[in-house]
Amino acid sequence: MKRITIILLIVYFLGLNITPACAWKWQHDKKVIQSQVTEYKFKDVNLDWWQNYDDEYLEGYIVKAIDNNYDLKIATLKVEEARQNVKMQFSKELPSASIGAAPLLYKYTGVTNTQSNFGLPMTVNYELDLFLKNHDKTKSVKKLHEISKFNEKAAYISIASAVGATYFNIVKLDKLIDIQNEIINDRKKIFELMQQRNNIGITSTADETRAEKAYVMAVTDLKDLEKARFILLNSLAVLIGESPNNIGELKRISYDELAYKKQIPQEISSEIIMQRPDYLAAEKMVEKAGIDVRVARKEFLPKIDIMGLLFFSTSSLGTSMNWTNALAGILGQAMLPLFTGGAKFANLRLNKNKYEQVLQSYYKTNLVAIQEVNDSLSSLKLDDEKYRKNLKSYDMQKADYNYMKKRYEQGVISNLDLIQQKETLLVMSKMVTASKTDCYIDQISLYKAVGGKL
């Protein structure tokens, strides 16, 4: 017993010396892992593609979202959770060993003194995985780990897409608000001119009232635009992990500086679609479901357990424990369930049913992936064509407005006619702004549909 006590004390003191070194190594390894995680996160969102917009603010928000978005942190934690589940399941393939202490006091009938005994039991248990059932269970849990990685990747692409779409909509609203302020100023001038004309009897009161109504409606439209921008700024702040109270600090590029270097793809290869995270996750789900069916079949086979026991017993703590006081044994058993009320048959049918569900979901994921890519690509092409037509109409309207300016300078038309012509030009400018932004949103939708592989 003295020897055992000395050994335990030595291990304790050695542990005190080893712990700080282990803690330092753990912190170092943690930093290395975090660096590696950050690298593959940027790879998942394809940051090079976002650089085609040549917008440092947009790139900065994408990086902030990768580092700070709470949904992404949850997705990463779920990957770690799945990894630990793999370790837990794998431990069932290995033997388990335990050691304990068993002090005992007892007294025989007719004996006045109490006797004591002290035992040190050690047991080893192992389920012999002769039919690889536990190994298949580990493979099934590993598939969940792989699926969690694909889900994490999909989350990163989704958040990056949300940041980009929100950002471009804010830039669009900045421009629309500027245009709307010009429209308000022009309608105010029209209303004032109508008042003057009504005072001298040139214009009716009805015309003056319509001009005032148009002015009030323009102010109302401005409030709607400002409200929409405020909401989007709050959304952007949450996406990048910042407080909505700091939306005044969220900088962005001017609408007039928006540009995209890359050409619109005319078609998307099916190989790219097959690299989508949700497609790969669905594929792994089919593989997992197949393994679960195999495990359900193996539940009908015998379960083989092996147990070993080593027990040291001594009548007093001062007595040293040796092999003369030891009891050792090994036991093996094979148990085959004869009647379980149909539970195992139901479990097998249940897993087969789940496999069919997962398989149908896989087929659906494939079709939805093709649909989303086709929808995004078609929308991008059509919206680009729409933008070019709106831009052409705007250019013609601008030329017409310049012509009207010359006529006004020559005294052929009134100032009221010129202001009304300018308002038409501003309305066309709003259409061009909206259609151009739609093209950028479509590009992001296509980026998301192909899993970031543009």
Image (cartoon, helix red, strand yellow):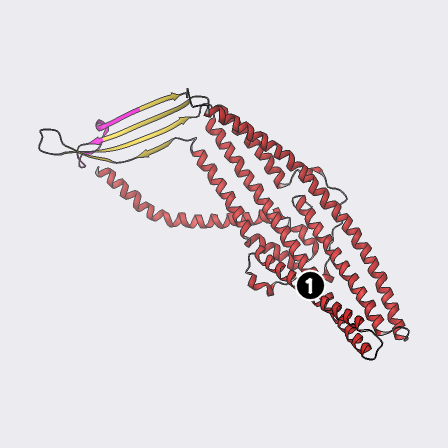
The answer to whether residue 43 is visible is no
Q: Is 187 above or below relative to 69?
A: below
Is residue 323 one of those drawn in magenta?
yes
Judge the density around disc 1: few (<14), some (14-19), many (≥20) Cα neighbours within 10 Å.
some
Q: Is residue 66 above or below residue 355?
A: below
In-front residue for pair 253/206: 206
Q: Is residue 203 visible?
A: yes
Q: Position of residue 448 (x, y in %)?
A: 66, 46
Is the residue 105 above or below the residue 306 in the image? below
**Viewer-closest of 176 and 147:** 176
Q: Is residue 201 left or right of residue 166?
A: right
Query: Can you give x and y, in whole percent of width and height, for residue 197 in the image?
Result: 82, 77
Q: Is residue 73 magenta?
A: no
Residue under numbered circle 1: 174
Q: Which residues are magenta?
A: 313-329
Name the element at disc 1.
Answer: helix
Q: Amino acid at mark 1?
A: Asp
Residue sitting nearer the eye, 341 or 72: 341
Q: Quadrant of residue 169?
A: bottom right
Vertical position of residue 329 compared to residue 77: above or below = above
Q: Position of residue 10 (x, y in %)?
A: 28, 43
Could you tell me which residue is drawn at 19 percent across and 32 percent down?
Answer: 314
Quick one: which residue is furthest to the front in this view?
A: 205
State which quadrant residue 391 falls in: bottom right
Is 280 situated left or right of 373 in this image? Answer: left
- Residue visible at 34% across and 48% down in the picture: 17
Q: Position of residue 186 (x, y in %)?
A: 77, 71
Q: Is residue 142 left or right of residue 17?
A: right
Residue 185 picture quarter: bottom right
